């Protein structure tokens, strides 16, 4: 049974595209058929993060407008043949995304893939609404920062009221993914902690991705971080998130600061 | 963490993350309610008028007045939380309102 997952956040720049690529690649590496779909019409970037920007010929809008078939628009990843990408259009207007067109493409993708990961645009407009509409699961990407948490809360409200599942009286399964987490700053009380964000949003935690230079390095070379440096801390956190997304009940590893001897002796108050 | 941080550690209440958490909790409680109610005219009107009344007697910071409505099946709860600084109380305690004065 195919599962549609929307990767969403409300706020821009928190790591939706990075997360879509990393989760998609991790799922595909376990042999499942995965497609990552870019819903950010006009500002597509999933193709670039996945390293297939030079192979884009047709896109999601072409398929919706019946100008190309799904087969023509899907790009198969060269590193992993169970992974495909459906790019967004860079030139068209986001109004070209029609409700019926998206529904048709999603139904067709459900026939062919085990996992369909939809990379939502930022904001709460049409593109974001359509990206989440058919979702069974939602990964809410949040940074430990006040504006990101507030926007996530808004998106959670939309997932509970405006999706196909909500309209049928069912729930989209929501998961919180905390990204760009800096354990040292959190321990100093300079950054919202994992417990703070989980407590405020009251969502089950899918994973905590530490702030890491490996993420930027991977995007520089056009590879999901789970392909580029699978042993790195962020990649391991993404692999763990995938395990949990597949329903395995494993404890979440929270990144910790590397404490020196002196820090341990002079334990701080209030933490 | 550096050696000196151990000596200059802050209390939880002084940490900016604690401030962030508290601000979010208050804001999101209001925004969630606003989404449910669809219209916050009543709360906003109460907020403005309560502030007016308070301002006649004590000096308060607008940010320190929180008004919250919890709607229930059988009854609703209106919660008004006002933080008044010590100085504010001492400065202007008076039993008459300005327009009653001769």
Image: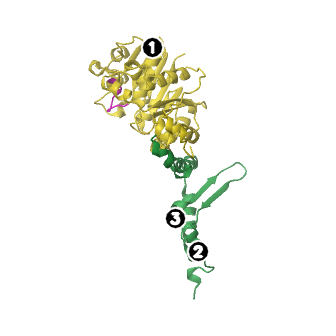
Q: Which residue is the site of mark 3?
A: B61
Instruction: Decide if residue A56 is on the left or right side of residue A164.
Output: left
Q: Position of residue A173 (x, y in %)?
A: 57, 29
Q: Which chain is yellow?
A: A
The answer to which of B10 and A224 lies nearer the viewer is B10
Which range of residues does the magenta coloring cover?
Answer: A40-47
Query: What chain is tagged by disc 3?
Result: B
Query: What chain is tagged by disc 1?
Result: A
For the point 61% across and 81% down, the residue is B96
Tag 1 secondary structure = helix
Label 3 and label 2: CA atoms lie apart by 15 Å
Q: Position of residue B31 (x, y in %)?
A: 54, 48
Q: Which residue is the site of mark 1?
A: A29
Q: Residue furthest right?
A: B74
Q: Which residue is the site of mark 2?
A: B90
Nearer the viewer's eye, disc 3 or disc 2?
A: 2
Label 2 and label 1: CA atoms lie apart by 69 Å
Q: Position of residue A178 (x, y in %)?
A: 49, 34
Instruction: Decide if residue A97 is on the left or right side of residue B57.
Output: left
Q: Is residue B54 visible?
A: no
Q: Which chain is green?
A: B
Tag 2 secondary structure = helix
The answer to which of B21 and A155 lies nearer the viewer is B21
**Position of A159 relative to B96 (above/below):** above
Question: How many C-alpha atoms fall within 10 Å of the one at disc 1: few (<14), some, or many (≥20)?
Answer: some
């Amino acid at each position: 049974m195919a599962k549609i997952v929307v990767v969403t956040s409300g706020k821009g720049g928190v790591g939706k595209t990075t997360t879509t690529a990393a989760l998609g690649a991790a799922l595909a590496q376990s042999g499942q058929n995965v497609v990552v779909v870019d819903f950010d019409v006009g500002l597509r970037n999933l193709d670039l993060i996945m390293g297939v920007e030079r192979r884009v010929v047709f896109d999601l809008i072409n398929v919706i407008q019946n100008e190309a078939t799904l087969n023509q628009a899907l790009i198969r990843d060269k590193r992993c043949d169970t992974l495909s990408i459906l790019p967004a259009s860079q030139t068209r207007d986001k109004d070209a995304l029609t409700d019926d067109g998206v529904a048709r493409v999603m139904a067709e993708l459900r026939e062919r893939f085990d996992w369909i990961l939809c990379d939502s645009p930022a904001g709460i407009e049409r593109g974001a609404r359509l990206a989440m509409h058919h979702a069974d699961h939602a990964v809410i990407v949040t940074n430990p920062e006040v504006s990101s948490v507030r926007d996530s809360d808004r998106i959670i409200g939309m997932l509970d009221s405006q999706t196909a599942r909500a309209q049928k009286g069912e729930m989209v399964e929501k998961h919180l993914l905390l990204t760009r987490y800096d354990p040292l700053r959190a321990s100093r009380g300079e950054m919202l902690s994992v417990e703070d964000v989980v407590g405020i949003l009251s969502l089950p935690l899918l994973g905590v991705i530490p702030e890491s230079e490996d993420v930027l390095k991977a995007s520089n070379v056009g590879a999901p971080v789970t392909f580029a440096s699978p042993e790195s801390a962020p990649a391991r956190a993404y692999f763990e998130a995938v395990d949990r997304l597949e329903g395995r009940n494993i404890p979440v590893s929270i990144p910790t600061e590397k404490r020196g001897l002196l820090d341990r002796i002079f334990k701080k108050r209030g933490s | 963490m550096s050696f000196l941080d151990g000596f200059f550690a802050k209390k939880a209440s002084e940490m900016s993350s604690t401030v962030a958490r508290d601000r979010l909790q208050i804001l999101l409680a209001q925004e969630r309610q606003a989404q449910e109610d669809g219209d916050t005219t009543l709360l906003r009107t109460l907020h403005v008028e309560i502030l007016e009344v308070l301002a006649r007697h004590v000096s308060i910071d607008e940010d320190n007045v929180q008004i919250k409505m919890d709607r229930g099946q059988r009854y609703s709860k209106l919660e008004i939380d006002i933080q008044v600084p010590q100085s504010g109380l001492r400065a202007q305690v008076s039993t008459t309102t300005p327009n009653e004065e001769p």
